[in-house]
């Protein structure tokens, strides 16, 4: 599969039903949503982007933005037509809670919660000094040809939908830096918000710093939790991640997320480790 272009997309919205404090989307998956572990399943980044897109569409009583969203991916999310249901679980003018469930037919495959917080222009005196990120350096000026790790037959379609410059940790627990940006649209013929585009690449935190022989082992993250300080102001997203693991088959990845101007988010993911 060739690299995605700016007119390509991960999904297509084929139906919408809006009710009081709830919305149901009918979604068709496009090939670029595909992931690394099963050719019939989506990449976690595509799932994360779809949830953020569904949340982003929900109205709020005052200006708000997402401060945190958490995904539990119960099963591999297939590349088949999906139903995405989002509802407001807690209304309010300062804090709003939302829940999104992705269905494969009648089977829930992902459930997510999101917290939106009101925004204001009246607290400018509390703004922190601009934060530099010397440990991440600057976003890459050129994108080298991506080299897939041993253990995978091909580059996953979702990776072909991104510009990706991964770091390589030498030992487990050593920080590693990955830079990523989404090349295409999330939903066909629609512009994605900066938060949705951020959500699309945050799943790369689960592999950043993960020193593992993928010819022998797999490391699937069944969850993803992202706390967002502010929306990104650049296309490139820097991920400074650390992955640790336990011999009982559970690992953890945690990462600080930056744009070209400084820190913007933190990500945590649980890893399900297994033999291949």
Image: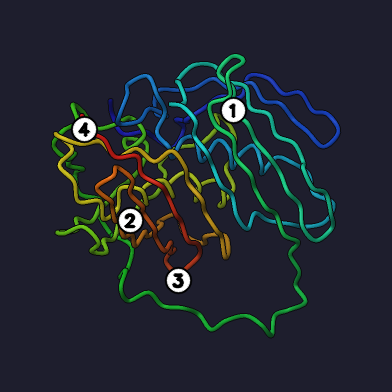
Q: CA distance from mark 4 to mark 1?
A: 28 Å
Mark 1 Cα within 10 Å, few/some/many (few <14, many 20+)?
many
**Residue 46 image position (x, y, % from top left):** 46, 35
Secondary structure found at label 4: strand
Q: CA distance from mark 2 to mark 1?
A: 28 Å
Q: Nearer the viewer, mark 4 or mark 3?
A: 4
> Which residue, given by chain and number where applicable, does mark 4 sit on?
275
Q: CA distance from mark 4 to mark 2?
A: 28 Å
Residue ID at (47%, 61%): 266
Mark 1 and mark 2 in contact (Cβ < 8 Å)?
no
> Which residue, given by chain and number where applicable, does mark 1 sit on?
102
* Image quarter (top left, top right, bottom left or bottom right) of the N terminus: top left
Residue ID at (59%, 22%): 103
Left or right, 207 with respect to 22, comes to left
> Which residue, given by chain and number where applicable, does mark 3 sit on?
262
Q: Nearer the N terminus, badge 4 or badge 3?
A: 3
**Residue 176 image position (x, y, % from top left):** 26, 61
Left or right, 175 with respect to 132, comes to left
Looking at the image, which is closer to me, 183 or 168? 168
Residue ID at (72%, 23%): 16
Q: Nearer the viewer, mark 2 or mark 1?
A: 1
Q: Nearer the N terminus, badge 3 or badge 2?
A: 2
Secondary structure found at label 1: strand
Disc marking residue 179: 2
Secondary structure found at label 3: loop
């Amino acid at each position: 599969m060739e690299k995605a272009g700016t007119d390509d997309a991960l999904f297509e919205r084929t139906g919408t039903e809006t009710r009081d404090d709830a919305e149901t989307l009918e979604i068709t998956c496009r090939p670029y949503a595909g992931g690394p572990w099963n050719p019939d399943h989506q990449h976690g980044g595509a799932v994360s982007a779809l949830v953020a897109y569904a949340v982003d569409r929900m109205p709020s009583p005052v200006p708000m933005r997402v401060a945190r969203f958490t995904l539990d991916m119960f099963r591999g999310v297939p590349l088949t037509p999906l139903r995405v249901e989002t509802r407001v679980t807690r209304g309010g003018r300062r804090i709003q809670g939302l829940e999104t469930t992705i269905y494969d037919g009648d089977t829930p495959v992902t459930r997510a919660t999101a917290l939106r917080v009101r925004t204001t222009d009246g607290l400018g005196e509390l703004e922190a000094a601009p934060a530099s990120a010397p440990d991440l350096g600057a976003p890459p000026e050129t994108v080298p040809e991506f080299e897939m790790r041993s253990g995978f037959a091909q580059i996953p379609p979702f990776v072909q939908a991104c510009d990706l410059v991964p770091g390589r940790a030498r030992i487990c627990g050593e920080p590693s830096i990955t830079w990523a940006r989404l090349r295409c649209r999330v939903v066909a013929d629609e512009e994605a918000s900066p938060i949705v585009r951020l959500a699309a690449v945050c799943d790369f935190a689960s592999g950043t710093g993960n020193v593992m022989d993928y010819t022998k082992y797999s490391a699937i993250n069944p969850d993803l939790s992202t706390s967002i300080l502010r929306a990104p102001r650049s296309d490139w997203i820097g991920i400074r991640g650390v992955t640790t693991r336990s011999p009982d088959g559970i690992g953890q990845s945690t990462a600080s997320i930056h744009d070209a101007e400084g820190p913007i988010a933190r990500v945590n993911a649980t890893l399900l480790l297994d033999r291949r």
